[in-house]
Image (cartoon, helix red, strand yellow):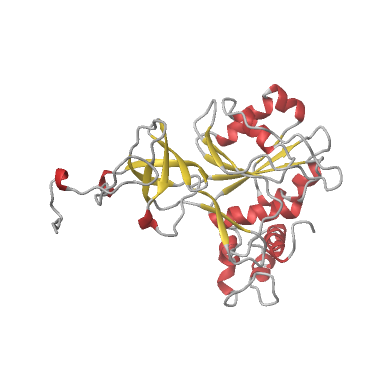
Amino acid sequence: MRRYGKHTDEDDIRSRPNRKGNRPRTHIRPKHEDAAEGLVLTVDRGRLTCLVDDRVVLAMKARELGRKAAVVGDRVAIVGDLTGRKDTLARIVRIEKRTSVLRRTADDDDPYERVVVANADQLAVVTALADPEPRPRLIDRCLVAAYDGGLEPLLVLTKSDLAPADKLLELYGDLDIPYVVTSRAELESGEAADRVREQLDGRITAFVGHSGVGKTTLVNALVPLERRRTTGHVNAVTGRGRHTTTSALALPLSGADGWVIDTPGVRSFGLAHVDPSRVINAFPDLQPGTEGCPRACSHDEPDCALDAWVADGHADPARLYSLRRLLATREHTEGD
């Protein structure tokens, strides 16, 4: 029986038939140093659509990556057929280090955390002021996930023609979060998209919100060449819309330099993975005061040093209240 060494000629390699096609397979794998850089645009049942230079390439994860999964927004190294032609499939051999990660769990008792988006600079939390009614508890949870994952939050309030925004904005005034208020008429005229686009220029922004708030409608206005089916129905009993975005999708921002990542509508946002010690990083005026806190302090207990820090005039009491309100949201459901 003839044996083959590591340095055989190409003509000497014995090919194995591929049961699913007519292309022969060999034991030779493309070299990692020859890999091209790509951006994951969407993931669908094990197939990843990636942008390589100016080409859209379909790829799958290499076996050597094991259980490590790539998500939308990941920078990856890709080998194989990178032409982007129909019926071609490349292979992702490396997932580059992430600069930020948006995670969530199914609920607060679920130990399994799911990475929603990687490498986003900003999280746009979209909520309607009416029809359906705003859910501050869910907004709080999204803010905690943003602070924990290294994303800067942005509030986008829709349907201002149905209800005023003052009351909701007052609730978040002490967090110094940038915001945009839009109406349905402004959305139809394109004015809403123009004002939101100013906050997205030069950044990668993930959009999140529960169904029926107009999130995908806004994304369609920001990326007019990538029209996606919008929510056309809001349940009159629950006040919630039907999901129309079924998987995260990265789209190039129209009229500016940046990316928009549309994510599926959420009904819950579990925070089982969040460590309170990381959320405090979003409050630089309070962070120095934690030096006197007991070990593993929740920042909402009698011995917390933040009370004395605020009492001595180092920070506004409203800021401490906001921090504790965000941390307390982990102990309640979004519908509270």
In this picture, residue 183 sits left or right of residue 52: right
User: Would you identify the image quadrant in which residue 56 lies?
Assistant: top left
Residue 99, given in percent of the width and then of the height, sits at 46, 51
Q: How many marks?
A: 0
The residue depicted at 57 percent of the width and 25 percent of the height is 225
Residue 115, given in percent of the width and then of the height, sits at 54, 54
Quadrant of the frame with the C terminus? bottom right
Residue 49, above or below 61: above
Residue 214, given in percent of the width and then of the height, sits at 71, 36
User: Would you identify the image quadrant in which residue 34 lies?
Assistant: top left
Residue 89, given in percent of the width and then of the height, sits at 39, 40
331 or 282, nearer to the observer: 331
In this picture, residue 292 sits left or right of residue 14: right
In the displayed image of the protein, which residue is found farthest to the top?
189
83 or 73, nearer to the observer: 83
Residue 79, above or below 183: below
270 or 165, nearer to the observer: 270
Quadrant of the frame with the N terminus? bottom left
In this picture, residue 306 sits left or right of residue 3: right
In the displayed image of the protein, which residue is found farthest to the front?
1
